[in-house]
Image: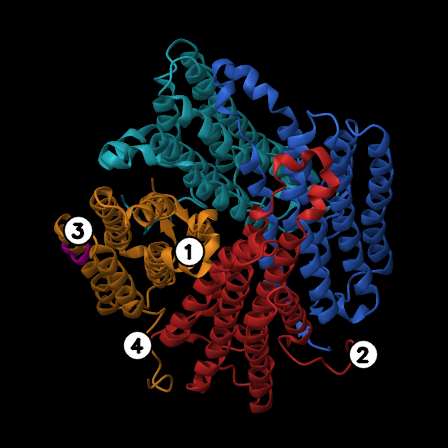
Chain colours: A orange, B cyan, C red, D blue
Amino acid sequence: MGSQWSTGRIEAFSDGVFAIAITLLVLEIQVPESDFGNLWYGIAHQWPSYLAYATSFLTIGGIWMAHHGMFRRLRFANQRVMVINLLLLMAVAFLPFPTKLMAETIHTNGPERAAAIFYGASLLVTSVLISALWRSVALDRGLLNPEVSDKEFYAILQATTPSIGFYVVVILLAIFVPQVAPFGYLAIAAFAVLRARGDRAPTSSADPA
Amino acid sequence: MGSQWSTGRIEAFSDGVFAIAITLLVLEIQVPESDFGNLWYGIAHQWPSYLAYATSFLTIGGIWMAHHGMFRRLRFANQRVMVINLLLLMAVAFLPFPTKLMAETIHTNGPERAAAIFYGASLLVTSVLISALWRSVALDRGLLNPEVSDKEFYAILQATTPSIGFYVVVILLAIFVPQVAPFGYLAIAAFAVLRARGDRAPTSSADPA
Amino acid sequence: MGSQWSTGRIEAFSDGVFAIAITLLVLEIQVPESDFGNLWYGIAHQWPSYLAYATSFLTIGGIWMAHHGMFRRLRFANQRVMVINLLLLMAVAFLPFPTKLMAETIHTNGPERAAAIFYGASLLVTSVLISALWRSVALDRGLLNPEVSDKEFYAILQATTPSIGFYVVVILLAIFVPQVAPFGYLAIAAFAVLRARGDRAPTSSADPA
Amino acid sequence: MGSQWSTGRIEAFSDGVFAIAITLLVLEIQVPESDFGNLWYGIAHQWPSYLAYATSFLTIGGIWMAHHGMFRRLRFANQRVMVINLLLLMAVAFLPFPTKLMAETIHTNGPERAAAIFYGASLLVTSVLISALWRSVALDRGLLNPEVSDKEFYAILQATTPSIGFYVVVILLAIFVPQVAPFGYLAIAAFAVLRARGDRAPTSSADPA
């Protein structure tokens, strides 16, 4: 239970899973041959797939950015971090399934509610797990690089927390207006990408933007 | 035959195969369109797929953790380690096939016995190969980092050995009650993840948990 | 907004996405069982798939080479570079879809125009994004390694710019003679691979070729 | 044309492509639902798929080992090495297609000849390209690490050359007895794995085996 793990290979393996999960999403997009007669219509008709693709891509991209920022601040991982990280990867690698389901049902009346809620719940789980990953570090500050200040530690915690609340709100929204929920998920993902914190605060001379 | 291989790129290539095999598992999960009328039922009805997904994911995750702990202790690999590692990767990359087969047949009466035994046999092979990988190191202690003690060497050997026995027990169980076997495989995988040894024992000041 | 990101893991994650997108392309190639009676004909009949495969492979390969050359010259990335890079990866991971569409329709009369234009537009987007990635560095020269000269900076900018113009020309061509466009895209990709600039200019003693 | 490329990222990208191509092979293996009534028969009946899987897996594994040994001896790559490496990756990533074709047709009479020859030709191309990669280094010895002796350089060249001859022989064999050819390809792959040379010759104290 008290083992230590070097972070380099955890990052490499996690990056592999993130990169593959993010890339597999495109395999689900297809124009049925019956739409080849009017292919521009057929391409346009797949918009739910593009929306679902962009949402899941940005969601996983945002998780990768948060993951990157967290592991750069660790000296090593313990057993608890390893297990939570593995559960996070399991949740991320699962996303292509609810993504496909939401894309397939958005056109139809009836199943689109269940699909939107199921997709949101899957995103919520990943969000809870990335937050739990960082909280588990709080239980053993010896895992952190010594130069990480308390202020920086809490800034990262606060950067991952709001998504959880947003997901709960949009899932509730999906119960009443399921067609709107996918756009809500996309907005949360875009917001998380823009809000992600880097490996360190800017040095005084760099990036005044 | 006496060649030496640096471990960095073996780790990178192995991580790639582990990450892809673990992520491809989701491609097999699908709700048939005939279940779109009652999508919540359709999603719930796929529980064998989720069980098989979680089991194979945790199994490969546990193998990755053991692999990580082993290669961190090697100075370099010889030809024998390279060949066993390649066979291990071949067995791991094969897992999506028996995983899918078990998920497809668990509902039906008849083929579920063969599928559960075939899946268990595939897991047993990976377990034997990861154990053989470490045993092959014992034949040439010059491969090990000098700071690895005999006690540590045998602790790793003992960490991988029990799974082999557990798999034999659950495969025998599958002959009589095949429906129970998948849960047995999941328990073995979860146990292996929790039992995995890190890159090194904890330093005195770290992780009192 | 002023965060800094180390480039090592961005390269690893991007390489993962490039490698997977480039490898998934083959999954679309298939000889229908009805052509098994005359398999040589069936294999030859898939030439549009091979053409599309080679074109997308070389396009992604060229983007990878440009990406490699750019990130080797960065000290670290800022938020803007991270976001543009993520959009670039999203466009690259999307390519298997228009690739498949073009391969499927090249034989048939009618949809091949839309498919060729849609494919070209997808390539144009990746080309604009890799160019935007480097332009965004120009807004904050503090991101660059100090040894990168202005001359080198502009040489890289000029190496990525012409593709944009070429794509516009071939897309316009595709409106009138869609069957010719795929070969135009292939030529652009091959040209980009041959034109790619390395990590640094050759040292005086090396490679007189 | 005279650019230099650092090898680290070429190795990472190539490893990604090798790892994915090797792992995608399993996606083609499937037991048709009509064989679920007698699943042991159905599993056994897929033996051509297992044979094709093992052959392509070991072939790509052997190429990876040769690639590993080559790039460890390079100081950097030039444009020519980059282009040949990209063509090699294109050939390797293509292998799942002829692999699937051979597995599908081995049972049937007629198409199995074309499939065995087409598969062998694809393997021959990868073998020629990995050999060409190393020969292209001979044109500019400045690419090599200074400690690589001429003897070592030619030993690597000789390690990759025989496969080319073997493939030609087995392809000719496939014209007359196509059913035997797959086993020939497997033997060549196994032989290449066992013959692969490491990063460096053994040091005096290591691995007397």
Q: Callout 1: few (<14), some (14-19), or many (20+) C-alpha neighbours within 10 Å?
A: some
Which mark is nearer the camera, 4 or 1? 1
Amino acid found under the numbered disc labelled 1: Gly
Pointer 3 residue? A174
Pointer 1 residue? A42
- Note whether B110 is above or below B161 in the view shown: above
Write down the chain letter for disc 1. A
Pointer 4 residue? C1
Which mark is nearer the camera, 2 or 1? 1
Q: Quadrant of residue C137?
A: bottom left
The one nearer the camera, D139 or C83, is: C83
Which mark is nearer the camera, 4 or 3? 3
Q: Marks 4 and 3, Cα distance to the nearest angstrom?
A: 32 Å
Magenta highlight range: A165-169
Write down the chain letter for disc 4. C
Pointer 2 residue? C208
Q: Marks 3 and 1, Cα distance to the nearest angstrom?
A: 27 Å
The one nearer the camera, A79 or A166, is: A166
